[in-house]
Image (spheres, rainbow, N blue to C red):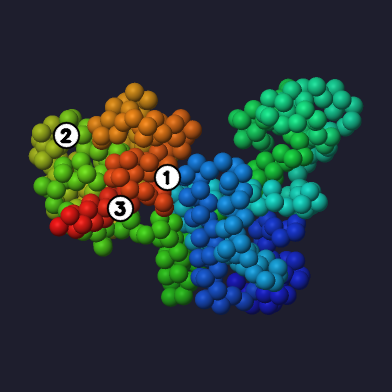
Amino acid sequence: MEIVRSHRQLAAAGGGGGGWAGGLPTYRVAPQLEVRLEEFELFAIDRLRVLKGIADGLSRGKRPEEMEKLVKELWKAHMRHQDPAETLNKDIISHFVLRLVYCRTEELRKWFLSMETTLFRYRFRLESPESQRMLMSEFQLPYKALPHSEFEAVKEKLSQVSRTIGQSATVESVFFKVPFEEVPDLVASRRVFLSKGYAYVAMSQVVSLVVTQFRCNISKALVLTNRKWTATMKEQEKDRLTPIVEALSNAYFGPDYSQPKDAVEISLKDIDQLAKTSFPLCMRHMLEKLRENHHLKHGGRMQFGLFLKGAGLKLEDALAFWRAEFSQKVGSERFDKEYAYSIRHNYGKEGKRTDYTPYSCQKIISATPGVGDHHGCPYRHFGEENLRAALNKMGISGHPLDDIMDKVKNRHYQLACTMTFEAAHGVSCDTGINHPNQYFSESQKVLKAKVSHHS
């Protein structure tokens, strides 16, 4: 970032984060100002606390009104400053720092885009109507208010939609006619009147139009930032910014559950017992299928193999583990020729020597298993009967099981996994489960605490 003006000058000039209405930037242009390294990191950490709080709220299935309250509280706790100009500066700087941090892989980009879009959505809703109209202008949305004659022609239809979604029968007077694909969330929840490929969006719903454009802008910007980072910045900043960026990106998982270097070492003889006590459902299922078929397809080998690595299984034991199973179906010689290389590759011993890390819940949930695949997330990819049976095998039944299935029906898969952990261990998990190795690590802590208490 170039050194051209002070923080206060940035806010006064109105030229740091694209445009903004009120206190809500659009982050279209990176700020050009002096930023001390301490602020570079501390501002990003504070914003990351906000984004992590949003992620936890979503994973626990909070309703929109609860999320709006949560966002307001998180922002006040971590980002607010007595001087509104300083709040604005911190807002803009922290966004662009985290954009740099989370541009570097598809998974990181996806998480950052989702959380920033959610943050923007609820902050927009908290803005005044005048500020909202200013933001619409800032995004240069090509939509005009519905003419009175056309409004009168569809007024009864609009009233029906209003009553259906539980709003007042009095129809708002300002509507925008937009292509239905521009507001997929409103269409999916049946909150708009549709006619001939157009959705009729009320002024109170215009947040969906703005958020769609915001998401598109940030998505494109993340890809461009990644190209610049990879091409020049990573090497140029290897002694200054790169260590900070890498440290901040690890904060995505909270405690670093994806890195095996600090994990307790587990051995071959431990795996089956640990699976019964401490493996999440997705990993229990894959171990069961591996024992049954003596084979897993590539997706399963990656997901389960990296999980075992993160849990502390050393390379030598990993080779022995997979060889013992696969050789029963394909023979030892074929295993050494076709499968051993990929295991060593996952441990950073072949190819580019990349030290691969275990998959997060987000990546597992977004997988698309095919016929004969056993990877993915059981809460998303199992049918109801199979999921109930799998949870029953873990000793979960009655009200806890019904509560878990209710979360699954509402697509709160990580919350369902968190509730499974709580039911299986008899403890609460306030932070939520966002990584299979977190599930394993927290389970081991609970079990060891119980042993210590009884001894």
Determine contact: label 1, label 3, CB under 8 Å.
no
Measure the C-alpha gap from mark 2 to mark 3: 25 Å
Measure the C-alpha gap from mark 1 to mark 2: 26 Å
Q: Which amino acid, mark 2?
A: Arg
Q: Which amino acid, mark 1?
A: Gln
Q: Residue at x 77, y 22 (%)?
A: 157
Which labelled disc corresponds to residue 362? 1
**Number of numbered discs:** 3
Q: Is residue 160 left or right of residue 116?
A: right
Is residue 187 in view?
yes
Quadrant in which the C terminus is drawn: bottom left
- The label nearer to you, 1 versus 3, is 3
Circle 2 sits in a helix, a strand or a loop, which is it?
helix
Which labelled disc corresponds to residue 291? 2
Q: Is residue 437 left or right of residue 366?
A: left
Q: Is residue 181 left or right of residue 201?
A: left
**Above or below, 98 relative to 361:** below
Residue holding disc 3: 442
